[in-house]
Image (spheres, grey):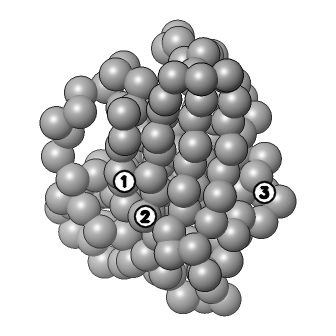
Amino acid sequence: MLATLASATLTGVEGRSVTVEVHVADGLPGFSIVGLPDASCREARDRVRAAIVSSGASWPLRRITVNLAPGGLPKAGAGLDLPIALGVLQASGQLPAELPSIGAFGELGLDGGIRPVPGALPLADAVAGELVLVPVVDAQAATHVAGDRVRP
């Protein structure tokens, strides 16, 4: 099953749109992230898994592939944790497949908490979606550019 969410990454001080695609399939369990992620994005595998399990959801024992598009755009920081986790939950059937168009950014703690990320204003400006899910601490700044689409 495939889930697609909108997010963003920072290039300098500019927010750039990123599409997070999560595919969950039968096969040997594994978790890979492709699409030019930096070290902190690759570490998202561990943060996302721990956060999902700590939140009481089930980790799917299946093959999980995350694509961060566009492939030629370098992705940096931990702000893609939240959309990756939401995509894993949606693609594994733990969240409804018919959710509205959602954009998100935020770092996940191992306890499942959502932490703020640098650059909330340009990230919120770059994220597409009917709703934009952000860390509570970043919500006020995000509403300046994304208005009533923001949900902490």
Q: Are marks 2 and 1 in contact (CB under 8 Å)?
A: yes
Q: Secondary structure at mark 2?
A: strand
Horizontal arrangement in the rendering, residue 59 relative to residue 102 (left or right): right
Q: Which class describes the residues within 10 Å of circle 2: few (<14), some (14-19), or many (20+)?
A: many
Separation (CA) of disc 1 from disc 3: 19 Å
135 up-or-down from 140: above or below: above
Mark number displayed over residue 40:
3
Residue 40 at x, y percent in the picture: 78, 57
Between 149 and 141, the one lying in front of the other is: 149
Residue 45 at x, y percent in the picture: 71, 39
40 up-or-down from 126: above or below: above
Question: Disc 3 or 2, which lies upstream in sequence?
Answer: 2
Question: Disc 2 or 1, which lies upstream in sequence?
Answer: 1
Q: Could you tell me the amino acid type at mark 2?
A: Thr
Between 136 and 96, the one lying in front of the other is: 96
Residue assigned mark 2: 19
Residue 1 at x, y percent in the picture: 36, 33
Q: Secondary structure at mark 1?
A: strand
Between 30 and 146, the one lying in front of the other is: 30
Residue assigned mark 1: 5
Mark number displayed over residue 95:
none
Horizontal arrangement in the rendering, residue 124 relative to residue 27 (left or right): left
Q: Secondary structure at mark 3?
A: helix
Q: Could you tell me the amino acid type at mark 3?
A: Ser
Q: Residue at x 49, y 29 (%)?
A: 25
